[in-house]
Amino acid sequence: MDVILFGPPGAGKGTQGALLAERLNIPRISTGDILRQAVRDGTPLGQKAGAIMKAGELVPDDVILGLVRDALNADAAVGGAVFDGFPRTVEQARALDDILSESARPLSAVLVLDVDDETLVKRLAGRRQCPNCGAVHNRYFSPPQTEGRCDRCGAPLTQRADDQEDTVRRRLEVYGSQTAPLLRYYEDSATPVHRVDGTGTVDEVQERLRQVLDS
Ligand code: AP5
């Protein structure tokens, strides 16, 4: 089964994608995670992509498509994958169709997470991560007990480079102008498109996704 989790920055694609992938026993392919790892590793790709991501813009299609091809060639992805943050342009969507049709794998569904803009901004601009244990806090929804310190391990919390509020707003603009139009591409295709309310608790959203996929 190949499923796309679609939605604006902060809609919960990563959070829900991880749970969905575990339940379906297939890998989650997150182009954002792959790029951030390349930035951390200081590879030539990371050096090129880092500045683009920090500005809230999209990394060029040819770069992204190379990454996705590599991820799909991994053994774990032969039975399908949950795509998180990919595709983001019509060119990427067409390329994914071609790649999947080479192995006779029709796309099973596009799941669209709907969340209002103000909630998205708070989720992202308020996000603080622990570089030590990976815990995620939010200064609006789940503030740490000690300002700037991880509740779980006490390490200083950090903010993702593209989670500054002005960059968050730019990411939302880029989503609206370059990625949201892609929905029309899928609505005109044979792949079912399902809109799911992405607000509420993580478990509530996951249950909605489960019901849609089961149906
Ligand atoms: P990417 O990593 O894909 O980021 P994004 O889609 O912009 O946004 P996030 O990952 O922050 O949001 P999400 O929807 O995954 O939500 P999450 O679960 O994290 O891309 C980053 C950059 O890389 C792009 O800007 C671009 O430069 C580049 N890039 C990546 N892919 C590309 C591509 N295909 N083409 C070109 N460029 C590409 O949740 C967000 C927060 O909300 C978390 O703190 C989470 O804990 C919280 N949260 C989640 N669900 C809930 C809930 N139900 N209630 C309360 N809080 C919640």
Image: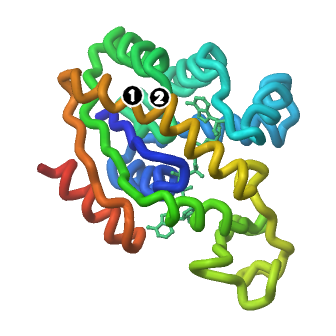
Q: Nearer the viewer, mark 1 or mark 2?
A: 1
Q: In this picture, is 75 found above or below 154?
A: above
Q: Position of residue 63 (x, y in %)?
A: 66, 18
Q: Is residue 124 above or below residue 166?
A: below
Q: Position of residue 129 (x, y in %)?
A: 72, 66
Q: Which residue appears farthest toward the bottom when viewing the image? A: 145
Secondary structure category for the residue under label 2: loop
Asked which quadrant contains residue 37, the reply is top right
**Residue 31, disc:** none
Q: Position of residue 88 (x, y in %)?
A: 50, 30
| Residue type for callout 2 | Pro
Count of marks overlaid on the render:
2
**Residue 137 against residue 14 in the figure, above or below:** below
Q: Which image quadrant: the N terminus?
A: top left
Q: Tell me: is circle 1 under 8 Å from ligand 1.
A: no
Left or right? Give the position of 11 relative to 40: left
Residue 86 falls left or right of residue 52: left
Q: Residue at x 62, y 13 (%)?
A: 62
**Residue under circle 1?**
182
The disc labelled 1 sits on which kind of residue?
A: Leu
Q: Is mark 2 within 8 Å of ligand 1?
A: yes
Q: Residue at x 47, y 50 (%)?
A: 13
Q: Earlier in the sequence, mark 1 or mark 2?
A: 2
Vertical arrangement, residue 188 with respect to residue 125, above or below: above
Asked if marks 1 and 2 touch (Cβ < 8 Å), the reply is yes
Reading the image, the residue beneath label 2 is: 87
- Element under label 1? helix
Cα separation between marks 1 and 2: 9 Å
